Image: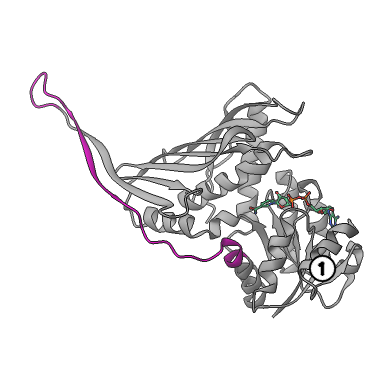
Amino acid sequence: MVSVAIMGVGYWGPNLVRNLIENSLCSSVTVCDLEPEKLRKLLRRYPGVSVTSNPGEVFSSPTIDAIMIATPPKTHYELARETLLRGKHVFVEKPFTLSSKDAENLISLARERQRVLMVGHTFEYSPPVRKIKEIIEAGDLGDILYISSTRVNLGLHQKDSSVIWDLAPHDLSMLFYWLQESPTEVLATGKDFVQPGIPDVAFIHLRFGSGAIAHVQVSWLAPSKLRRTTIVGSAKMLVYDDTENIEQVKIFDKGVNYRDPDTFGEYHLSYRAGDIVSPRLETYEPLQAEVTDFLESVIYNRQPRANGESGLQVVRTLEAVERSLSNSGHIEVLATAESVV
Ligand SMILES: NC(=O)c1ccc[n+]([C@@H]2O[C@H](COP(=O)([O-])OP(=O)(O)OC[C@H]3O[C@@H](n4cnc5c(N)ncnc54)[C@H](O)[C@@H]3O)[C@@H](O)[C@H]2O)c1
């Protein structure tokens, strides 16, 4: 069993607290937030947890094995570094860090200290995303030609983080998890319509070594909530709609075949429109699977699925997106198309 502390119980942290309390692999939960009112509110919901507003107490506690960090992104690096230096395992919410240099430092520190380092790529634990991975790996869609992802809503505008660092980690981590490769080229356009200097809309294009291309649209400035991904393969096509209650994934037996014409004037395209199938999905909470992966990684001394390397691939891509954005959509070439297995 693992004794865990959570740092930061603003909007997201309480979800981690609930999932830890419900997890039989967790022996105790300590909660730390700089704002005492947040702790009072949490205690009303979960009277059994220990609370403190002093992070130093958590770092120096000999009984706490691991810390989960759900504080604002700009604090992730220092808190995760301190956690590892104190010999504790660490889980860091997305975005892992705000620079690839910081991400690399944390990866080497975790390796040196032989501690678990995990990143909160929650979607990699969600039943539809896992099912889509199985479908792609089974070859049901054929070769992946392109993926188009839309994650838009009205708000929540962040004070110190752009829509790119807030929302795009979800889509990028899913893309890399499905394709098992990182992009070779990235370009992006976007704009800060509401708060000066903080982009709230972005259109991101990615090219992969396999030949696949992808497009990710993220926005805090849209009339309705859309969480929709289309994957077009050479054999079949798939639509994943995370806002649906049922049938979140649909596979379309649709496609178009090109045939060299035998005679001049012969029509050489044939369209296919077959069945639409919605596969059965398991019904567990993604956060419960994520927390279990972290606790099991600590107990069995193994790498979690969303490890530091996968966090680094996302951060490197986000940096390239930002460079392109501030350079009028210039194509950013990324060093190599490393695997993110
Ligand atoms: N995985 C997901 O789906 C998901 C969803 C939402 C948010 N997040 C991530 O969770 C993190 C937190 O987001 P949020 O929306 O809850 O932010 P928030 O601002 O609502 O809450 C952050 C909390 O951290 C506390 N805090 C700040 N510095 C601290 C420190 N040094 N020690 C202890 N507490 C400290 C603040 O007082 C605040 O209560 C972000 O990284 C965000 O991207 C992840």
**Residue drawn at 59 percent across, 47 percent down:** 170
Q: Farthest residue toward the left? A: 263
Within the magenta stretch, is there residue 276?
yes
Tell me residue 193's x, y (percent).
Answer: 69, 25
In magenta, the rendered stretch is 261-290
| In the foreground, 233 or 54 | 54
Q: Farthest residue toward the top? A: 265
Quadrant assignment, res 236: top left
214 to 36, vertically: above or below = above
Mark yes or no: residue 210 visible.
Answer: yes
Quadrant assignment, res 331: top right
> What colouring method underlies this structural image?
one colour
| In the foreground, 35 or 190 | 35
Tell me residue 273's x, y (percent).
Answer: 23, 40
Judge from the rendering whether residue 191 lies leftward or rightward of residue 254; answer left or right: right
**Residue drawn at 34 percent across, 57 percent down:** 138
Residue that badge 1 annotates: 43
Tell me residue 49's x, y (percent).
Answer: 80, 73
Q: Farthest residue toward the front? A: 44
**Residue drawn at 53 percent across, 45 percent down:** 182
Judge from the rendering whether residue 99 lies leftward or rightward of residue 139; answer left or right: right
Tell me residue 305's x, y (percent).
Answer: 57, 62
Q: Amino acid at mark 1?
A: Leu
